[in-house]
Image (tube, helix red, strand yellow):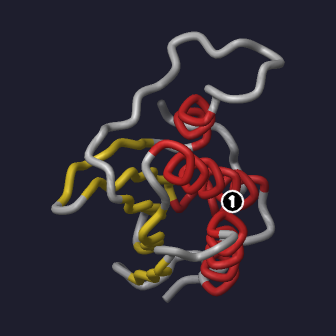
Amino acid sequence: MSVGLPAAGQRRRLALSGVRGAVAKGRDFTRQALRDWGWDGTETAEDTLLLVSELLTNASLHAGGCRELVITGGGKMLRIEVCDGSTALPHRNPAPRRGVPGGHGLHIVERLSDRWGADIVPGGKVVWAEIEAARLVSGDTTTRQ
């Protein structure tokens, strides 16, 4: 196994139902996974932590709370999944106002990830984002969108 490339399909799960401080716990959990996989210490790793924060915050504010955070690393991709109990799909605020809090979360997710989306699952949905492993190794913060 090469440094920076965890074995295909390494997956970590963090249960968050009813947990206080879910965003901070999710960031710590993700930070540790990135460290273990050799993907820490770059600007892209910091962007990944912000991405996790945005996804968890959106679930807390708009979907009744987070149920689970799943981080999958392997091969060419890091995938972040936030599971919640709502079937309402997320939608970007078409024109968030500069300098005004709120309404920027999905713009941030779109900007920091290489791909993102949402899938309806039994009992709710999963909002996911992916970052190419090469960016985590190199620290390149540019995306391929």
Front-most of 20 and 25? 20
What amino acid is at disc 1?
Leu
Look at the picture and state if 132 lies above or below 3.
Answer: above
Front-most of 113 and 14? 14
Left or right of 85? Residue 92 is right
The residue that label 1 is drawn on is: 49
- Give the mark count: 1
Look at the picture and state if 117 lies above or below 18.
Answer: above
**Percent from the top left, x then y, of residue 49?**
68, 59
Q: Residues within 10 Å of mark 1 (few under 14, many from 20)?
A: many
Task: Please identify the residue farthest to the left as the structure is shown.
Answer: 122
Left or right of 110? Residue 29 is right
Instruction: Say which quarter of the image contains residue 99.
Output: top right
Instruction: Say which quarter of the image contains residue 7.
Output: bottom left
**Percent from the top left, x then y, of residue 37?**
60, 82
* Residue at figure coordinates x 64%, y 86% from the top left: 36
* Residue at figure coordinates x 42%, y 63% from the top left: 76
**Percent from the top left, x then y, of residue 98?**
77, 14
Front-most of 49 and 25? 25
Look at the picture and state if 48 lies above or below 117.
Answer: below
* Residue at figure coordinates x 33%, y 58% from the top left: 85
**Percent from the top left, x then y, of residue 112?**
61, 41
Label 1 residue SS? helix
Front-most of 119 and 134? 119
* Residue at figure coordinates x 56%, y 46% from the top left: 61
Left or right of 122? Residue 72 is right
